[in-house]
Amino acid sequence: MVFVSLVPLSACFVRKRVIAPPSSALRGPLLIASKNELIERVHRIADPLESFNMRVRMSPSMGSLYVGEVKDYATLGGYILYRRPDDIRILGLDPVLSSTVFDMVSVGAIFRIHIPSKSRFLEGRNDVPASAEKKWENLRPVAFLTSLIIQPPDPQTDITVLEEDISEREAAYTLLIIRRSEDEPWLLRTLRFDRHNLEIIQQKTFDSTGGLLSDTTYSDWKIYDGVPFPSEIDVRRPQDHYEVIVSVVNLRINPADLTAEKFVLAPPPGVQLEQLSK
């Protein structure tokens, strides 16, 4: 009898509402891909890249929203050189005078940075945490390497899990790349793919404690010498308190003239070498 008496009142507890379709739905149907198909897409990006010479615009910012202060600096011109497996050089140029603002190189475990305006030449190891009070001293060329070169997971050392995410804002696949460890496996990286075109839109990297090392977003993918590459790259390093937006002006893939000599950076006369690792 209680149930029968509540039936006429059920309409009072039901409310219909019209929901606008997600903005992502307006872009067309979603593409479907398996974990292995997404990994293969990463291989098609990374495998052809033996080296590159990239002319760029760089827009750096120092500080953090979490500490309540962010300083945006003038957009610089410059070049980024890469040579497999891990050689990278970043040259920042004054947008008006075309003089060198900074010159950074990383070869193997060692990086070097030259700042002509301050007559400083810094050297250190890539595995030593950046902890300088002056945030610009925390710039590391290997941070660009991590964000610019999107590597596929290594089946010998990594476990890869596929996650699907559909929300009102976007529809995406995420590859969770987990590093095997004798102590405890840990999340090494995530790669996020747009479900409308299966392009990579974000990569996050983490340390062994779960701390976010880098958060890089990718957009405006183009074909350079037959190889897909993003022309807009936003590199965020929250622990180092800086961000650099890299806009590709021109990109040469596997140029024959990009030799090992292009990654040699020595202190100019009269400038003392500073060991940051100490």
Image (cartoon, rainbow, N blue to C red):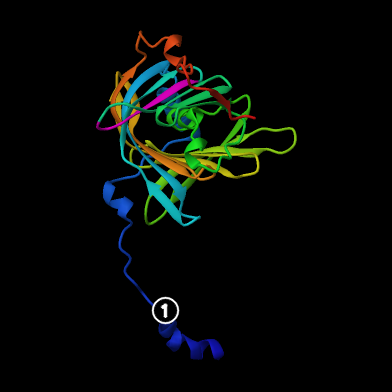
Q: What residue type is labelled 1?
A: Val
Indicate whether residue 91 is drawn in magenta: yes
For the N terminus, give its image quadrant. Answer: bottom right
Q: Nearer the viewer, residue 131 or 11?
A: 131
Q: Main secondary structure of the magenta part?
A: strand
Instruction: Give the magenta part as a residue range.
Output: 87-96
For the C terminus, give its image quadrant. Answer: top right
Q: In this view, does 110 lie to the left or right of 226?
A: right
Note whether residue 217 is visible.
Answer: no
- Vertical order, 255 against 210 (above or below): above
Instruction: Find residue 31 and report its horizontal and vertical position in percent.
Output: 36, 40
Q: Which residue is drawn at 47% across and 35% down?
A: 34
Residue at image mark 1: 14
Q: Nearer the viewer, residue 208 or 239?
A: 239
Instruction: Find residue 42 and report its horizontal and vertical position in percent.
Output: 44, 28
Instruction: Find residue 190 and report its horizontal and vertical position in percent.
Output: 51, 39
| Residue 177 occupies quadrant | top right
- Crowd around label 1: few <14 · some 14–19 · many ≥20 (10 Å): few
Note whether residue 21 is visible.
Answer: yes
Instruction: Find residue 162 and report its horizontal and vertical position in percent.
Output: 52, 40
Farthest residue, direction front = 270
Could you tell me which secondary element the residue under label 1 belongs to? loop
Q: Which residue is drawn at 61% across and 30% down?
A: 158
How many numbered marks appear? Answer: 1
Q: Nearer the viewer, residue 233 or 118?
A: 118
Q: Residue at x 33, y 23 (%)?
A: 54
Indicate whether residue 50 is drawn in magenta: no
| Residue 9 occupies quadrant | bottom left
